[in-house]
Image (cartoon, grey):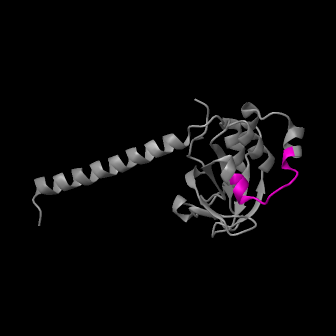
Amino acid sequence: MMSHPRMLQSIINIFLKIINKIKGLFMKLTELYESDVYISNEQWKRELSNNYYPDGKTRAVVVSMTPDDFLYLTPEDPSIENRAASYGEFDANQYTSDWLPHLDIDKSGKVLDHEGRARMYMAKQSGVKIMPVLIRFSKVDRVGDISEVPKVLTQQEGTGKINISIVGLVTYGVDNPWVNK
């Protein structure tokens, strides 16, 4: 059995390891947020009201994603250039108040549907490197913890895969990680 000073030292060492892990995670998340595109607080609240359930679970997570990754996961669209041109130039300020591009997935990470391909194409053409994207589950496949979210997504039409970085659950008690500070 350990003496009290040795036990206290062990507890302190464990605590310091936890602090260092949190610090490392914070640094990783800070890198993920380096973006030219932000989510307004109004938009964040709208996503909360659309995706959070009273049982404490959500059907959405926010991820950092390159426009190329988003486009890779969605089916090719030969008319994307024309559709994007019809919207005009990409405006990051407009993006903060519009609906976020999203990928609807099943629990295995297979993309089932999407919205926002033209906006992501426009962002890519404008030189945007990282954008916030909403990953949504069906209403019955809600999640209560980040560990329940697949870390790999599979193309909507195909078998190609990409790894994702999960920024956070869309749930009350989580501040908007993409607000322009």
Quadrant of the image occupied by residue 81: top right
Question: What percent of the width, then of the height, locates residue 115?
Answer: 78, 53
Q: Which residues are magenta?
A: 70-81
Q: Quadrant of the C terminus?
A: top right
Q: Is residue 150 magenta?
A: no
Q: Is residue 57 left or right of residue 16?
A: right
Residue closest to the eye, 51 or 158:
158
Q: Is residue 30 above or below residue 21?
A: above
Q: Residue at x 17, y 52 (%)?
A: 9
Q: How many marks?
A: 0
Q: Residue at x 57, y 41 (%)?
A: 175
Q: Is residue 16 left or right of residue 64?
A: left
Q: Residue furthest top?
A: 181
Q: Is residue 115 left or right of residue 179?
A: right
Q: Is residue 76 magenta?
A: yes
Q: Quadrant of the N terminus?
A: bottom left
Q: Residue at x 86, y 54 (%)?
A: 78
Question: What percent of the width, then of the height, locates residue 14?
Answer: 26, 54
Residue closest to the eye, 103 or 120:
120
Question: What percent of the width, then of the height, locates residue 64?
Answer: 60, 48
Can residue 72 be seen in this snapshot? Answer: yes
Residue closest to the eye, 173 or 110:
110
Can residue 99 be seen in this snapshot? Answer: no
Quadrant of the image occupied by residue 160: bottom right
Q: Is residue 6 above or below residue 98?
A: below
Q: Residue furthest left?
A: 3
